């Protein structure tokens, strides 16, 4: 073989491009000598989409067109699936140099066209030595022609009587060779070779063989043998040489059945005996049948391994090639957002017949077959198990060239690595007994992408809409597949609390249920967390079974009412709500009766209620002798040691200290005369009570002359214990008692928390300041 090249004429190009033979990429043009033809292949990547060939001989160049190829023994096709174009040239093709039917020399021009329309011509030459000896008769059923060649000295030939009669009748007229085409029910009309050539029939005589070639034409006889379509051409040559009439009776028959798709693969049938080949021959028998693909026969172990089957009965031969079996070409693509595919295989078939003289007829057949456009139905299986609380969705029936690249879950895109990072699991699994594969997607119900729907009837629904983006490789053509899964639970209700009154606290208890996580447990506007509980002094115990919360009396969140010296109600509310809507779904306000010891409550209405033990400040002081700065304000209740006062912020002489409202509890001096006025110089004030309100409430106060706070005040009771000394009474801060506060939306700032904590754990500095204030007011 040899390649030569030059660059051909170009359309509208000012520059003459040049290609040197050394530029030929590897495999750009290849040739191979097969049993009965030369195969020339050229890669489309090199030759462009529309390469063509010309046959070259001493007479010049002969473009191989469709028609010309079918008459002259050339089969050219472009095979995009394989990425190449191929030319099969019969050893008896018109422009091939034939030396003794043994050595065949071919010469072609390959004309390529690149993307810019530039044509280049490469010369291809090849020489083949016959790989396999000729059989006496050989029939080649190419895609575009039928060819028969016979040894010219076969002794056992015989003709039909009709033909003899016709040949004798016409032979008187001429001594040159004539040809008649026998057709059923038609008169035999002789014609010259040139007339026959014009009809597309080619006859030629080589050194040892007679060759006849015919395109598949409407003139050929179409017959049906047991459901198989067979095309037959039956020429009879004759010539009269003096008293001898020589006659050659030829026949060429090819089965032209198309391959069929039977749902599993491609099936092709042919009659076991092509009766036209038999006609006139006695005892023709089929002796050997072989199959292969792409113009080459395959050994049986290989065909078996690939799943091909060859069934030979007395009447028919049936060949089946399973879908996507090796040796064929499969193509998948997207149409109308559907995954489509087809499969193509180029069947090669050989059958050997023997007649009773032992003369062999060898038939070879090329048959391209393809499936129709098939839709691969993907399968979606909902493998969700409610108890696992994970959506498990199986997407199957994906061909090996289909990849999952993105899942859109309720509108959120995740690539596969992203999904993996986000706690979703996508695994690829092979499908048993097939080349298909599948993906399993797992999305926990709790995942943020899952839509949750809760109705107060106790119905909880999780839903997930999936839009799979799949691509077909290698072109990465995308298509989409949709699926939806839903999971429903009944009798799902918010957590329920039990409240228990203790001596100095309220306890709440909640048993955990499956869907508790849907709700948040709230105290006031805050979510109950370990952190919050620690900050506010709540005692929380949470294990897998239940949550226990103990809220000590006077801690943040309590409200109080009906305070008297004996007892009061303290209540604390805990609730559960849906996080998004903040809608309270269940709440428990537990009110408990507590023993009163010391209390100060600064209400949002601006009322201070205080119970305190005055004897701590002045031992032996009479509680019923106490009064506020305004001495007409007397305790509402007293017992042996304690007093209960309740007064408005603008009454009883309460001092406004910026945002601090303060009052003193005074005690009468007993040592003075009994009828001494209550408000005497000797009056000692022993307890200062104080409410501190936010500044904003103060502005309101001035604007409306009416008290109405957004948030309750912070109360303090300062009890001063007199200490006897030589020259004066030194008042000492004994303790800062209680601070009571209710929640307000903005009050869980550092300020209120620290205020709260500092009252519980007053540090030294604060004591000093309080004392200092005291002495300023009471010099
Ligand atoms: C067609 O098939 C039948 C049996 O199915 C057989 O008897 C007959 O010989 C066959 N004909 C040909 C031409 O093969
Ligand atoms: C999966 O593909 C097979 C054929 O490959 C088909 O029989 C089956 O019905 C498909 N499954 C679904 C759910 O479409
Ligand atoms: C997801 O990540 C895990 C490790 O975190 C890995 O084992 C697994 O193969 C990954 N899956 C995919 C589909 O990438
Ligand atoms: C796969 O093939 C094996 C044996 O070939 C068979 O036992 C099994 O049932 C097949 N499985 C499926 C899912 O078809
Ligand atoms: C699925 O996702 C693709 C890509 O984002 C989009 O074009 C398509 O409209 C989606 N299909 C549906 C039904 O949402
Ligand atoms: C999927 O499976 C779950 C659990 O078995 C079931 O509740 C649900 O109805 C199924 N169907 C859909 C469409 O999600
Ligand atoms: C209590 O513990 C459970 C797990 O045992 C947890 O889901 C829940 O969030 C915890 N509750 C609080 C308020 O910390
Ligand atoms: C206070 O109570 C005592 C006895 O409990 C009584 O003797 C005294 O008169 C009362 N004083 C006033 C001012 O009510
Ligand atoms: C609370 O106070 C601490 C220290 O006093 C400070 O670092 C922090 O930023 C404060 N937080 C807020 C929300 O003001």
Image (tube, rainbow, N blue to C red):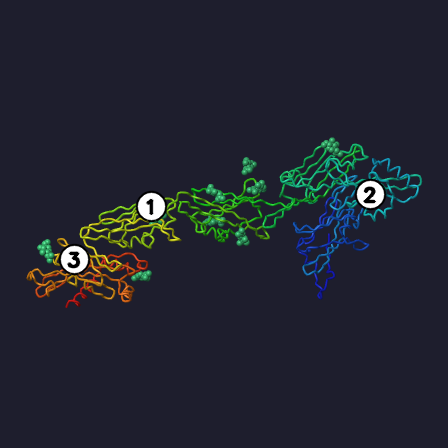
Q: Quadrant of the C terminus?
A: bottom left
Which of the two discs, 2 and 3, sits closer to the camera?
Answer: 3
Q: Position of residue 625 (x, y in %)?
A: 12, 58
**643 sits to left or right of 750:** left
Q: Give the camera-side residue of 770 and 622.
A: 622
Q: Earlier in the sequence, mark 2 or mark 3?
A: 2
Q: Earlier in the sequence, mark 1 or mark 2?
A: 2
Q: Nearer the viewer, mark 3 or mark 1?
A: 3
Along the line of sight, which residue is nearer the eye, 367 or 541?
541
Residue indicated by mark 2: 210
- Decide: is 630 above or below 511: below
Given residues 38 and 326, the one toward you in this image is 326
- Residue at left offset 12%, top offset 53%: 640
Identify which residue, 692 or 403, lies in the foreground: 692
Instruction: Judge the density around disc 2: few (<14), some (14-19), many (≥20) Cα neighbours within 10 Å.
Output: some
- Residue 757 disc label: none
Upstream in the sequence, badge 3 or badge 1? 1
| Element carrying mark 3 | loop
> Badge 1 is on which residue?
496
Alpha-carbon span between mark 3 and mark 1: 42 Å
Q: Which residue is mark 3?
A: 635
């Amino acid at each position: 073989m040899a390649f030569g090249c030059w660059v051909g004429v170009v359309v509208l190009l000012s520059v003459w491009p040049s290609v040197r033979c050394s530029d030929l990429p590897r495999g750009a043009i290849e040739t191979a000598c097969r049993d009965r033809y030369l195969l020339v292949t050229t890669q489309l990547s090199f030759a462009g989409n529309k390469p063509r060939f010309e046959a070259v001989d001493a007479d010049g160049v002969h473009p191989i067109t469709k028609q010309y190829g079918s008459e002259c023994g050339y089969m050219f096709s472009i095979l995009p699936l394989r990425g190449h174009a191929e030319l099969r040239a019969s050893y008896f093709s018109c422009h091939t140099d034939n030396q003794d039917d043994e050595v065949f020399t071919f010469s072609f021009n390959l004309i390529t066209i690149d993307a810019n329309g530039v044509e280049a011509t490469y010369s291809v030459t090849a020489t083949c030595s016959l790989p396999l000896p000729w059989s006496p008769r050989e029939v080649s059923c190419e895609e575009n022609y039928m060819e028969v060649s016979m040894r010219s000295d076969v002794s056992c030939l015989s003709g039909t009587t009709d033909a003899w009669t016709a040949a004798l009748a016409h032979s008187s007229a001429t001594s040159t060779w004539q040809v008649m085409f026998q057709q059923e029910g038609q008169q035999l009309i002789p014609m010259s070779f040139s007339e026959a050539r014009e009809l597309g029939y080619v006859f030629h005589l080589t050194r040892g063989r007679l060759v006849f070639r015919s395109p598949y034409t409407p003139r050929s006889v179409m017959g049906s043998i047991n459901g198989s379509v067979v095309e037959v051409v039956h020429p009879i040559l004759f010539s009269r040489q003096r008293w001898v009439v020589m006659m050659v009776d030829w026949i060429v028959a090819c089965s032209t059945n198309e391959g069929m798709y039977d749902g599993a693969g491609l099936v092709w049938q042919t009659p076991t005996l092509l009766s036209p080949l038999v006609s006139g021959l006695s005892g023709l028998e089929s002796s050997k049948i072989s199959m292969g693909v792409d113009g080459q026969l395959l050994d049986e172990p290989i065909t078996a391994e690939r799943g091909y089957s060859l069934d030979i009965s007395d009447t028919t031969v049936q060949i089946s090639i399973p879908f996507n079996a090796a040796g064929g070409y499969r193509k998948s693509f997207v149409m109308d957002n559907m995954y489509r595919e087809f499969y193509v295989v180029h069947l090669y078939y050989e059958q050997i017949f023997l007649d009773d003289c032992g003369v062999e007829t060898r038939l070879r057949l090329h048959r391209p077959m393809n499936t129709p456009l098939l839709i691969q139905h993907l399968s979606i299986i909902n493998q969700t198990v409610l108890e696992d609380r994970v959506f498990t969705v199986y997407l199957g029936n994906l061909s090996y060239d289909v990849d999952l690249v993105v899942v859109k879950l309720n509108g959120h895109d995740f690539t596969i690595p992203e999904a993996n990072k986000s706690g979703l699991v996508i695994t690829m699994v092979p499908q048993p007994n097939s080349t298909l594969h599948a993906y399993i997607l797992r999305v926990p119900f709790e995942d943020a992408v899952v839509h949750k729907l809760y109705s107060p009837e106790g119905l909880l629904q999780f839903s997930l809409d999936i839009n799979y983006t799949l691509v077909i490789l290698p072109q990465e053509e995308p298509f989409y597949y949709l699926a939806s899964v839903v999971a429903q639970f009944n009798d799902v209700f918010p957590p329920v609390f039990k409240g228990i009154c203790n001596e100095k606290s309220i306890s709440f208890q909640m048993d955990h249920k499956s869907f508790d996580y849907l709700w948040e447990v709230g105290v006031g506007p805050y979510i109950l967390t370990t952190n919050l509980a620690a900050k506010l002094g709540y005692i929380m115990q949470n294990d897998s079974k239940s949550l226990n919360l103990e809220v000590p009396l006077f801690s943040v969140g309590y409200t109080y009412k009906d305070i008297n010296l004996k007892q009061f109600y303290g209540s604390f509310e805990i609730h559960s709500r849906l996080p998004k809507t903040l809608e309270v779904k269940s709440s428990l306000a537990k009110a408990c009766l507590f023993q009163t010891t010391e209390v100060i409550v600064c209400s949002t209405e601006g009322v201070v209620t205080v119970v305190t033990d005055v004897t701590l400040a002045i031992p032996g002081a009479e509680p019923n002798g106490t009064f506020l700065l305004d001495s007409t304000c007397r305790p509402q209740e007293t017992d042996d040691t304690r007093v209960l006062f309740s007064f408005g912020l603008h009454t009883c002489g309460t001092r406004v200290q910026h945002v601090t409202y303060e009052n003193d509890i005074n005690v009468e001096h007993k040592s003075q005369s009994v009828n001494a006025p209550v408000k005497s110089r000797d009056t000692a004030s022993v307890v200062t009570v104080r409410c501190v309100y936010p500044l904003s409430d103060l502005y309101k106060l001035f604007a409306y002359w009416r008290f109405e706070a957004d948030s309750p005040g912070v109360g303090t009771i300062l009890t001063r214990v007199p200490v006897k000394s030589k020259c004066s009474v030194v008042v000492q801060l004994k303790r800062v008692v209680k601070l009571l506060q209710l929640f307000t939306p903005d009050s869980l700032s550092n300020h209120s928390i620290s205020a709260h904590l500092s009252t519980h754990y007053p540090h030294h500095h604060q004591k000093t300041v309080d004392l200092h204030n005291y002495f300023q007011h009471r010099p």
